[in-house]
Amino acid sequence: MVLNMRATSKEGTETAKAITRKIDIKPPIKGSVFTASAGKGQCTLAWSEASDSGSGMNISIPYEVRYQVGADPGSCKGGNPAYIGTALNSVHKGLLSSMKFYYRLCYKDNLGNTSQYSGNPVTCTPKANVSGAYDLPDTRQTACYDQNGTVITCPAQDQSLAQDGSYDIPLSYTDNGNGTVTDNNTGLIWQKRDDGRRYNWYRASGTYHKTYNPSSYNTCGQLLLGGYSNWRLPSKIELMTLVDYGISNSSPKINTTYFPDTKDDYLTVTSFAGDIEKSWIVGFGNGGIAPTSKAKESSVRCVRGEQLDFGNFRDNHDGTVTDKKSGLMWQQDEPGRMTWTQALSYCESLILGKHSDWRLPNFKELQSLANENGAYPAINKIYFPNANCNTSYISAYWSSTTYNSYKNGAYVTDFYDGTFYGGGKWGNPYTRCVRGGPDPFIKAPSNLTAKAVSSEEIDLNWKDNSGNETGFRLQRKKGNCSSTNSWVDLNTTISANSVFFRHSAAAANTQYAYRIRAYNATGYSAYSNCASAKTELE
């Protein structure tokens, strides 16, 4: 715009001058990246820099992030502010887990012109902000079957027959090279190979018994392995996390690369609440569980790390209940009896608590709901008051996992006493839906390696297995992979399709362990394997 200016001096002299002034009416040019990733009770927001060729980006508040729970805020005036300022990232803290948060990013220049990040809002579902939170490992059943047991192409999620095999989340382990194996989902550290002997429950758990363990011998408590002595006998659900239900017609049902020479049955520390003289064993022959006399001898695989805590519930007062440690959200009420295919369809179409991503739980998830310290009933009736659990064999609930022994059946859990059996898919057990867990659409990175290249730098390489990630998030802890030190999120930006990262914030002559996972707007993948390296001396 050209302005013709005329001025008169005190002496009466007139002067004219043409002034060209640029009027900025264009909004800022949007950045190319906006992401939200879930942490414990928080969402980490990150975005790329925007620009404005006219008046320039606003000096004080060039960026504003708006959010709303359960729905798109829609615009730069909708919802509530999650961040206002000049940074390119922010952590939105103090959030409830399992609630989905929707975010919009807005830009402003110095003349007040605004624009908004293109496309759909980014979403984030925070994890439980409690000590000991973990991802419950998948069953690894990847094949899908119809009601008659015939193999079918796995239906996509949200389709009526979507089942266990439709939600493929790989199990993830790290061989620590010292006779131990780390489960990268739970963080538990396992004895790689059992000692080949069989023990009764009293000797395995270190429990005194005048006949079966008069010397109070403790099989796991006396184990020295990998430089550690704090080994213990695992709980029922902890040991179940190792079962690989994707191994259909052979035994053992476990990854024998990481756990060679695995036997058919293993003891757990969990007593059967229905009979104090019995404890639970986990069978790696058929993937089942059963209460068995504590005097009976079975194999033992020891574990170390904080015991997984199940049944730590929160009533969301919207018809849903959240397990604060696993992050799984459960349907509080239930629709009644139905066939297996009807149960699959019901859960996939359910809309409850402002969520539509419900599904029928797999067998491990369903067993995590069983109260290990109770029977008659074996479910928490405070949080699930209408649960049907009054009589054995008619208190069964469906899982989405097809039974290994015959494919026209599915694993069910009887919440009268917590036992399981294979129920014919034409039968009519009860149904309770679930949502949450790692996102099966994002495949976890693998083959992570770590190599120190200086006293302050460690090079990380991995294989990118997903084609739909927004980027990667990296975690680190001091020590090697078998260390019990806590994992720490590194606030680093690693872009999509990356397979290399140099970590430059390390201390000299220090051992570090790393793990990485992919993410996008829907959530996280499972973790990669763990890799460790020691920085060089200065």
Image (cartoon, rainbow, N blue to C red):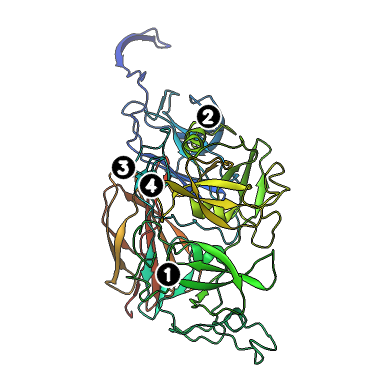
Mark number displayed over residue 468: 3
Asked if marks 2 and 4 touch (Cβ < 8 Å), the reply is no
Which secondary structure, mark 1?
A: strand
Mark number displayed over residue 92: none
Q: Which amino acid, mark 3?
A: Asn
Q: Which residue is mark 1?
A: 182
- Image: 86 above or below 526: above
Q: Which amino acid, mark 1?
A: Thr
Q: Which of disc 4 and disc 2 is earlier in sequence?
A: 2
Asked if marks 4 and 1 touch (Cβ < 8 Å), the reply is no
Q: Tell us which disc is closer to us: 2 or 1.
A: 1
Q: Residues within 10 Å of mark 3 (few under 14, many from 20)?
A: some
Inter-mark Cα distance, 4 to 3: 20 Å
Q: Which residue is mark 4?
A: 165
Q: Quadrant of the N terminus?
A: top left
Percent x, y of residue 238: 53, 65
Q: Is residue 287 left or right of residue 430?
A: left
Determine the residue positioned at 64% across, 71% down.
278
Q: Residues within 10 Å of mark 1 (few under 14, many from 20)?
A: many
Inter-mark Cα distance, 4 to 1: 25 Å
Q: Tell us which disc is closer to us: 2 or 4.
A: 4
Inter-mark Cα distance, 1 to 3: 27 Å
Q: Which of disc 1 and disc 2 is earlier in sequence?
A: 2
Q: Tell us which disc is closer to us: 1 or 3.
A: 1
Percent x, y of residue 518: 36, 50
Percent x, y of residue 332: 64, 41
- Image: 492 above or below 274: above
- Image: 305 above or below 386: below
Q: Which residue is mark 2?
A: 71
Q: Which amino acid, mark 2?
A: Ala
Instruction: Residue 62: tell me if it is visible.
Output: no
